[in-house]
Amino acid sequence: MTVSLYIDGHVTVVPAGSSVAAAIAAVTPIFRRSVHGTPRAPVCGMGVCFECRVTINGLAQQRACQVQAREGMRVSTDG
């Protein structure tokens, strides 16, 4: 079983049960950029480092490693 979601406007298909972080990683290694423009990506994978923050369905600052990918979800990175 799979789930389709939109990452920066592009359809991405991942196995059901995958995190949003896993879905993003299938598309790009960059999740966001620091205030100085440095590319950032998850470090811990368990919600401690906050490096995987993205906007999910209009809600900013969501930790992608802590959110399960759901059908039709819209994810926006600033990578």
Image: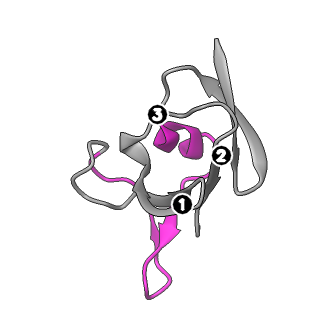
**Image position, residue 71 (x, y; %):** 66, 31
Horizontally, is 44 left or right of 72 in the view? left
What is the quadrant of residue 78 in the picture?
bottom right
Q: Where does the image place residue 65, in percent across and percent down from the top left?
A: 39, 43
Q: Main structural element of the magenta stretch: helix, strand or loop?
A: loop
Of pointers 2 and 3, the one earlier in the residue sequence: 2
What kind of residue is marked 2?
Val
Q: For residue 8, what is the image quadrant? A: bottom right
Chain part drawn in magenta: 19-44
Q: Is residue 65 above or below residue 50?
A: above
Question: What residue is rendered at 42% in x and 40% in y?
Answer: 67
Residue lying at the far right of the rendered structure: 10
Which residue lies under the disc numbered 1? 30
Closer to the camera: disc 3 or disc 1?
A: 3
Of all residues, the one furthest to the top in this rendering is 1
Q: Which residue is denoted by mark 2 in the rendering?
A: 27
